[in-house]
Amino acid sequence: MTSGFVHPEYIVETDWLAAHLDDPGVVVLDCTTHLIPNPASTYDVVPGRADFEAGHIPGAQFCDVSRDVSDTSQALRFMRQEPDDFAAAMRRFGISNTTRVITYSTANMWWASRVWFLLRSFGHDNAAVLNGGWQKWVREGRPVETGPGTPRAPGSYTVTENRGLMVGKEQVQAAIGDAAICTVNALLPAQHAGSGGNSYGRPGHIAGSVNLPAAHLVDPETNTLLPPEELRRRFAAIGALDRPVIAYCGGGIAATADALALIMLGHPNVTVYDASLSEWAKDPTLPMQTG
């Protein structure tokens, strides 16, 4: 593989976006969401609408990941929608099949990568995550807009294909003990070990899985993705570059950051366990490990 990204088109830099804010073919989605720890329910979901109204990239629209692009009829949070429901949500944001969609977050980048991954899973490859997110945009002194945002005229988006990039617990179970598949946990090391942080029912990780936290894919100083050679080194260290990968986390969000990085590195076979530990940890018949 070359030293750079095989698919650099899945992130955009702030200077590119600043130059394209008035492009009618570009739609920007602020995907900010906060998870507030709550011992009774693991966490409370707080959509970042207040953050958005206090300041956002000019012309952006607020995407409530928990409602706008999740199946709210399911017991588990953040589950992928049916294709028609997702398409309707995209049309409401003024998105069509030719639209260049840019996602960002004022919180962790994986809220932006979640929406990017949903678009990818439904066949829309013309989407990218803003490298460095809101933090970098503001640090550079770029323009900021306040208020609820300006709705766009409805788009004409339709789902062209369903690529099957989300897997269920059956595929994850089948991968346990299969050396040909790499199951990667994107949660923090303490959560993987079962020694600290949020637990989703039982502490620890899916049996046999390895750990590369989504938080370890970005430079803590700049909030930008690490250089491709460093990402490649980290994924190689857990054996994720040369085998099909199933990425998971607590609810299928952080896992999409690992998926984004792997896909940009040219990995041809990356899926996400959509329900992740929110489902797995609550079912005592499904094997977990600590340590």
Image (cartoon, rainbow, N blue to C red):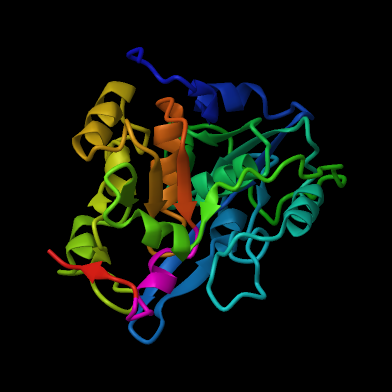
Q: Is residue 57 visible?
A: no
Seen from the viewer's position, the closer of residues 247 and 208 is 208
Q: Which range of residues does the magenta coloring cover?
A: 274-285
Q: Residue at x 32, y 41 (%)?
A: 180
Can you tell which quarter of the image residue 98 is in?
Answer: top right
Q: Residue at x 48, y 22 (%)?
A: 8
Q: Is residue 46 visible?
A: yes
Asked if residue 235 lies left or right of residue 52, the reply is left
Relative image position of residue 102 (x, y in whole percent): 61, 36
User: Can you name the residue that lies furthest to the top here?
Assistant: 2
Seen from the viewer's position, the closer of residues 239 and 10 is 239
Can you tell which quarter of the image residue 286 is in?
Answer: bottom left
Q: Residue at x 78, y 35 (%)?
A: 97
Seen from the viewer's position, the closer of residues 217 and 192 is 192
22 relative to 113, above or below: above
Asked if residue 134 lies left or right of residue 205, the reply is right
User: Can you name the residue that lies furthest to the bottom here?
Assistant: 40
271 relative to 11, above or below: below
Tell me the quarter of the image containing the N terminus.
top left
Relative image position of residue 171 (x, y in whole percent): 45, 57
Relative image position of residue 15 (x, y in whole percent): 53, 22
Q: Residue at x 34, y 36 (%)?
A: 243
Asked if residue 192 lies left or right of residue 100, the reply is left
